[in-house]
Amino acid sequence: MAKPITASTRVAQGLVLCAVALGVVPLLQFLLVQGPLRFSDHGIWPVVAFTLKQAVLSTLLSIGLSIGVARALVWQNFAGKALFLRLLALPMAMPAIVAVLGLVSLFGNAGLFPGLIPLYGFWGIVLAHVFFNLPMCTRLFYQALANAPDEGFKLAAQLNLGSLGTFQHVEWPALRPVIPRAAALVFLLCAASFVIALSFGGAAATTLEVAIYQSLRMDFDVPRALQLSLVQVALSLMLIGLVAKAFDTDSFTVTLRPKAMFRPMQTAWARRLNAALIILAGVLVCPVVVAVLVSGLGALHFTLITLQALMTSLALGFASALLAMLLAWPLARADDGLSHLVSLAAMILPPAVMATGWFLLVRGLPQPPAMTFGFILVLNALMALPFACAAMAGGFHKVTPMHDRLAQQLGLNGLARFRLVEWPLLSPHLAQGFLMAMVTSLGDLTAITLFGNQGLVTLPSLQQAEMGHYRGQDAAGTAALLLLLCGVLTALAQHWGERNDRT
Amino acid sequence: MIELKSVELVRPDFFLWADFALAAGQVCAVLGPSGAGKTTLLNMIAGFEPLIRGEIIIDGQNVAAASPAQRPISMVFQDHNVFSHLDLWSNVALGAKPNLKLNGEDRARVDAALARVGLSDLARRKPFEVSGGERQRVALARVLVRNSKILLLDEPFAALDPGLRHDMLSEVSAIAHERNLTVLMVTHQPEEVHHAVDAIVFIDQGQARAPMSVQAFFASADPAIVKYRGPAAR
């Protein structure tokens, strides 16, 4: 049933489109003044090629391995499986800069296993991307497989289809609809990679997003930033256009619990392979988390600058999450094509691109701290919007079919409907979305790097500065603080997510 | 013939015990209150639920430790009996060879089974292109191809309208007698199975009672059965 578009939806759509326009119009204006761009200049194509190459390989590895790990987790029961499934949510909570420190403390020159993995350059970037995306995809595929009807597995066992036949006839049909959207999401996240590429990249290993930042903040080469921005937008639009119907960010709101499922008997080799895949996922995820906590908990420090950064991070995170939820509620409720597209604004128009436009807009004007704070706040809110919308959409998808007709019949509208129907049922989704938006904002380094200055320091930017000044102990302490903060908020978000599943 | 000898299943919150036998060609309804263990009994016989103790004897062989594929049993579920990406013919053919590498004889069996359930004309359609009743007929055709000795039906016709349900039950009964199949069928409509079943197994509080005739079931003064039948049947 088509839902009427309310005024609040129009306002939310308008505000997001306005923010996008403020980013795009100055770029177009600049384009008109500068004349046509020549894409053969400035070595843009090697950057594009590198961005695509690392994104394609990161996507293939993340998707391929996570299908195996998800399948192994579905088939294999073991003590601590519930805990393991929860652990898989940790990389999603972990700010990229914290993961960078964890990987450096494991595989860096002064790390526990120096040289075991080439951390800097192409392979380091791919490894870090797999670290982040494998758990996310595993969770998504696990859910798809766990939701496949038990009868399919029973039928496969009865008909003696074997492992391959069961995969072909039961598991693959369950996975097939999920793979394109998982792949599209991973590809977009990797193609727009900033912190990872900034930390592990170099002159020959630069992504579009990093190149835009370098052009703007290091080289002050606005035409080049503009060219890179246009290529980035074209790439994002092309991909989202290809998988438009399937594309969403539900994977961030998935809650997993082991449940009783019938699975046919497996051969010893299949069990060994499953165990190996689960261990591989554990080896990929756990050491980085442990490394951050072990090196950081002892180095926790609460100096004035740390406390200032903590307060700024919390204030920015809270305000961004609030704004994201205020926008997400009407957008998710409308559930129409434009609202869906608007919610993905920061994925289609990457933050660095939007920031380039805003940067051009205020270039030459006095920039009071409040303006900088506002830019970062809005950018963070837009970056958190896809995940906030996904959390809210889950609620509306449940509430609307259940209560729409009854509410209409009883004449429950407006505030009464909100108070009696929507708020009690949607508040857990609101809490989950808010916490996820706050985690996204707390861990963000993109906005603060693009707009930040010495007067505005957040925990991620403080950690980056400490790493840059070779103050490893201080950086480890800041990273541990950030991880604990995000970890607690994610655990709370998961708690609300599980409540959502029960309602 | 199937014989359940003191089979027992124990879960933290559930217990089921059964000890009865059914002859070849006998069609038996499994009745009982919701949550009594009707589906669990069928799952146990099919090999989807492990037993704590007891024996399941089919034609003299104890199959209690055998995998579902090794048991001469076909089970038809309430839903999801077909693979949605395969056409009806291939869904039936899986019963002949799991790898779908069929010889001429196999193909003839598949064609004959589809003809027997009246689906020859729809053989190349996908499951979503046919009705719910036709999808359940596909499952019955596959049972014919598999040539199992025992057929377990877990409310496969519950979603069909009464007329179609009656026709399907008659068809199952006819196939059972034609092929000498032993059928155990979970249902929630005892009044509808009169014409199709030879016996009723009633499950209550984790215990499967010995099979009784339909007449004996409806005449029973057992308080649990009286309560289950409800006021209309009293």
Image (cartoon, rainbow, N blue to C red):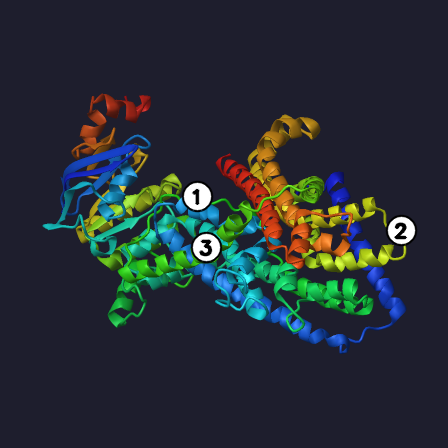
Residue B30, above or below A213:
above
Q: N-terminal of the two: label 2 or label 1?
A: 1
In whole angstroms, how far apart are the C-alphas of marks 1 and 3? Answer: 31 Å
Residue at image position (43%, 48%) is: A84
- Is residue B39 visible in the rendered structure shown here? yes
Q: Is residue A498 left or right of residue A471?
A: left
Number of marks present in the image shown: 3
**Which chain does tag 2 point to?**
A
The amino acid on which the numbered mark 2 sits, given as a three-letter code, is Pro
**Label 1 neighbour load within 10 Å: few <14, some 14-19, many 20+:** some
Chain letter for mark 3, please: B
- Residue holding disc 1: A257
Residues at marks 2 and 3, CA–CA distance in whole angstroms: 64 Å
Local secondary structure at mark 2: loop
* Tag of residue A376: none
Q: Residue furthest bottom?
A: A40
Q: Residues within 10 Å of mark 3 (few under 14, many from 20)?
A: few
**Pointers 1 and 3 in contact (C-beta within 8 Å):** no
Q: Quadrant of the C terminus of chain B?
A: top left
Q: Is residue B16 left or right of residue A118?
A: left
| Residue underneath mark 3 | B128
x and y percentages locating residue B125 in the rendered image: 43, 61
Q: What separation in Å lies between label 2 and label 1 (alpha carbons)?
A: 52 Å
The answer as to whether the residues below labels 2 and 3 share one chain is: no
Is A79 on the left or on the right of A330, as rendered? left
The circle on residue A366 is 2
Q: Amino acid at mark 3?
A: Phe
Residue A325, percent from left and from top: 68, 40
Residue type at mark 1 is: Arg
